[in-house]
Image: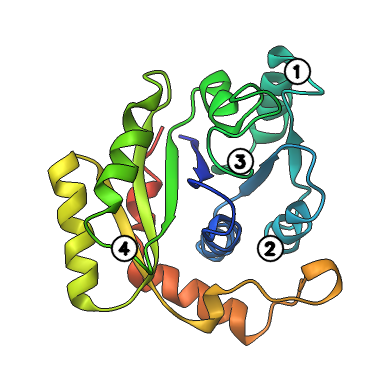
Amino acid sequence: MRTAFLVAAPMSGQGKTTVSRGLMSLYVREGCRVQPFKCGPDYIDTKFHAAVCGRPSINLDLFMMSIDEVRELFERYGSGADVCIVEGMMGLFDGYDRDRGSSAEIAVALGLPVVLVVDARSAAYSVAALLWGFIHFRNDVRIAGVIFNKVGSQRHREALRQVCRELGVTCFGCLPKEAALRQGSRYLGLDFSAGTEQERLVELLRENVEWKQLLMLS
């Protein structure tokens, strides 16, 4: 049975590219055939995806494509995969006109659950208001759960998990503040190397994220 989900965030800079790339790499190492996708016309994140998955990452863009074309691309490239991971763009509801063409609209068009990556370094209980808003903003967008990034301590971790319990949303994990979770920078902000930082990223995801539970999403 194929698993498919979309990785999004409240806004850019939350860590969704790092989490997407890390999950792709982790699942490949577990022997899964992973098909990557990217919302929008971005050609940079797709390079990260292809480097770890060993297959091209496909752009899904509702500005330049119709819904039927996006669906056809998703099925064509995802048909032979065990896991399809779609990385969102910008914030979940950011499109070319309000939320038109946004990651949320692609999730709805493809019937995908959304895993929200939230940078929690400067907040604890306040993320309850943020998550509540994202969960209830559009009834046709299914937020399957959240991965918190840049979590500072065990107490901070527990406070964030308590928020999820109160809201009835799944916490898929809490990633600590660590250098391996910061995207490297070289040319145009890129670093496609797969050295010790990549190894550490996979290790951190394996230790701190319910990656097996994510495989049950559909």
- Residue 14 at x, y percent in the picture: 51, 58
Q: Nearer the viewer, mark 1 or mark 4?
A: 4
Q: Are marks 4 and 2 in contact (CB under 8 Å)?
A: no
* Residue ID for mark 4: 123
- Vertical arrangement, residue 66 with respect to residue 11, above or below: above
Verify CB contact (< 8 Å) between mark 1 and mark 2: no
As drawn, is 67 to the left or to the right of 27? right
In this orientation, which residue lies closer to the viewer: 59 or 206? 59
In the rendered image, which quarter is residue 35 located in?
top right
Check contact, mark 2 vs mark 3: CB within 8 A.
Answer: no
Q: CA distance from mark 1 to mark 2?
A: 26 Å
Mark seen at residue 81: 3
Characterize the local packing of mark 1: few (<14), some (14-19) or many (20 or more) Cα atoms within 10 angstroms.
Answer: some
Residue position for label 1: 69
Work out how far the residue at label 2 is from the one at label 3, CA to CA, in angstroms.
15 Å
Residue 181 position within the rendered picture, expressed as x and y whole percent measured from the top left: 53, 74
Vertical placement of residue 25 versus 112, above or below:
below
Question: Residue 37 sits in which quadrant?
Answer: top right
Q: CA distance from mark 1 to mark 3?
A: 19 Å
Disc 1 marks which amino acid?
Answer: Glu
